[in-house]
Structure formats: structure tokens, C-alpha cells
Image (tube, grey):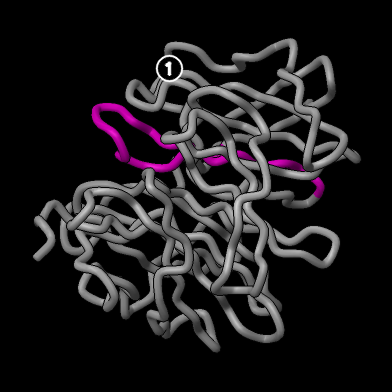
Amino acid sequence: MWSIGIYTGDSPFQLRGVANNPVLRNTDVTDVQAGFVADPFMLHTDGRWYMFFEVLNRATQRGVIALATSDDGFTWSYEQIVLEEPFHLSYPYVFDWQGEHYMIPETLGVSAVSLYKADEFPTRWSRQQKLIEGTHADPSLVRYNDLWWLFTCTMPYRHDVLRLYFARDLEGPWKEHPRSPIISNDKSRARPAGRILQVDGQLIRFAQDCVPEYGTGVRAFEISKLTRDTYVETERANSPIMVPSGAGWNAMGMHHVDAHLRTDGWIACVDARSGVHAC
């Protein structure tokens, strides 16, 4: 039911789908029988685009992390599964830091936020350590004012609680923010929905709207205050930025965006639900 598309625009808040969406479907996966593809994140390295995303392996009913590549960001080639564990994986939040490639996927099966590092980018990854113990869905990371900040939904089946942690070093120790949970009892804006951005000096957090159901759309929030003691965010006027179209590949829902600035504007990978069961 979920597939992956590419959106472009002059702003990460005003994006439109390209003509050849979806660019990746479950039928593009060649090494397992896939139920769906979702949760895409991109990196642009050495002139090439690398997309990491969840594949639901029908044989095991667990998520694995797969890779697709592109020269231009519009036409994608499926490569292979690059990370598999004896537990479910999703939401492969990839990022670069100090010349290394890292990934923080959702790892509910080990009851922790787990840090992975590329041993041989982009195809070989190994788990380095647990960062935060507990139940954490869609962990989303950003470096801001010389600290690491981590947003995570700690009620993954209710989608209504957002907690915030911070650390001086990526490996920790991590400390929960004194205002955390920063959202409670609100499934319309608690669960993370992709990469946190800095746009014109402002942090932007994307959230899933899970009303009336999971994965209905994506909302955008501007973080106006983020310190060790304070947290303030306001929804942007042009939110929601992703909504279902009512027809086609994104008919029923959208719940993820990873936007990147290029010389010709913004490009983003997104996912969407068609309402038609995968073949």
C-alpha cells in the first residue's frame, strides 16, 4: 500500500510531485518479496544520490533497510537490502558527521534508540551502541547550537507522545529535556515525519497527522526556542505540507518527507499510501 515518490519546489513547504511518481514500488524490490516500501531518507555523496528506506519482507513480516541510487534524484535504481536484523527495522535516518556515514533506524525490537555506522558505504552497516533505552518510534536527530537533539515518539501505537533528548556528543550520554514530553495526548502532531531541517536559520520539525488515522498527512512546525531548558514551536501557516490526493498512488495518506536543498531548488523523497493492497 505504501510507495515512494519525489517532490520538488522552491520551498520545503511548497512541494509538488514529479510526473513519474511513484519512483519506487514494492515490485521494484528484487531480493525479497516486498509488501511495501516506505520511510525514505536520502544522502548526496560524491555526485550521486543514495536513498535508504524500509522494505516489509513478506516472508518474515519484518522491516529491513534497502538502498536505491540515482544520478539526478528523479530516476532511481533499486540496488539491494543493506541492513537486516532479527527484529523489525524502519525509518533509516541517515546523516553524515565528521566524515563518517551514520544511521539511526527505528529499532523497537531492542527497546532502544540504536546508532549504526557505515563500515563500507552504502552497503555495509554495523550497530555501534544503544543511545537511549526504552520504546522509541521514528527517532529524528539534529545538530544545533553545538548539541545533538533527538525527538522520538514513545507511544508508537497511539502516536500521541513526543519526547526530546539532548547530548553534547553523538555517543552520549543522552539526557531527557526538562520540558519532555513536549507533546502529550495529541496524535495530530506528536509522531516524527522525517528529517529535521534548518531553513533560514530556523529549525523545522515535520510531524505525522494521525487523525483520523495513522499516516493521514504531514504538518510543519517552526522551533523558535530550543535550549537545555526551553522548547517552543509554532505550526507554520502553510501547514500541512503533505496531504493525500484522493486518487492514484497517494490517494489515502502521506506520512514522511526528507527535503534537501540543491542549486535549482528543493528536492524531497516522500511516501504515500494508495489504498490498493500490494501485489
Residue 25 found in image quarter: bottom left
> In this rendering, would 231 be left or right of 238?
right
Magenta highlight on residue 211: yes
Residue at horizontal 62 percent and vertical 69 percent from the top: 43
249 vs 212: above or below: below
> In this rendering, would 128 be left or right of 148?
left
Which residue is outermost to the right? 146
- Percent from the top left, x then y, of residue 239? 49, 40
Residue at horizontal 29 percent and vertical 75 percent from the top: 31
- Percent from the top left, x then y, of residue 95? 68, 58
Magenta highlight on residue 262: no
Count of numbered marks: 1
Residue at horizontal 19 percent and vertical 67 percent from the top: 33
Q: Which residue is mark 1?
A: 186
Q: Quadrant of the C terminus?
A: bottom left
106 vs 29: above or below: above
Q: Quadrant of the N terminus?
A: bottom left
Report the magenta residues as a range.
201-220
> In this rendering, would 255 be left or right of 154?
left
Q: Nearer the viewer, residue 16 or 55?
A: 55
Crowdedness near tag 1: few (<14), some (14–19) or many (≥20) residues, C-alpha within 10 Å: some
Residue at horizontal 38 percent and vertical 47 percent from the top: 86
Q: Nearer the viewer, residue 178 or 183?
A: 178
Query: Tag 1: residue type?
Result: Asp
Q: Nearer the viewer, residue 63 or 261?
A: 63
SS assignment for the magenta stretch, majority: strand
- Percent from the top left, x then y, of residue 268? 52, 64
> In this rendering, would 83 be left or right of 157?
right
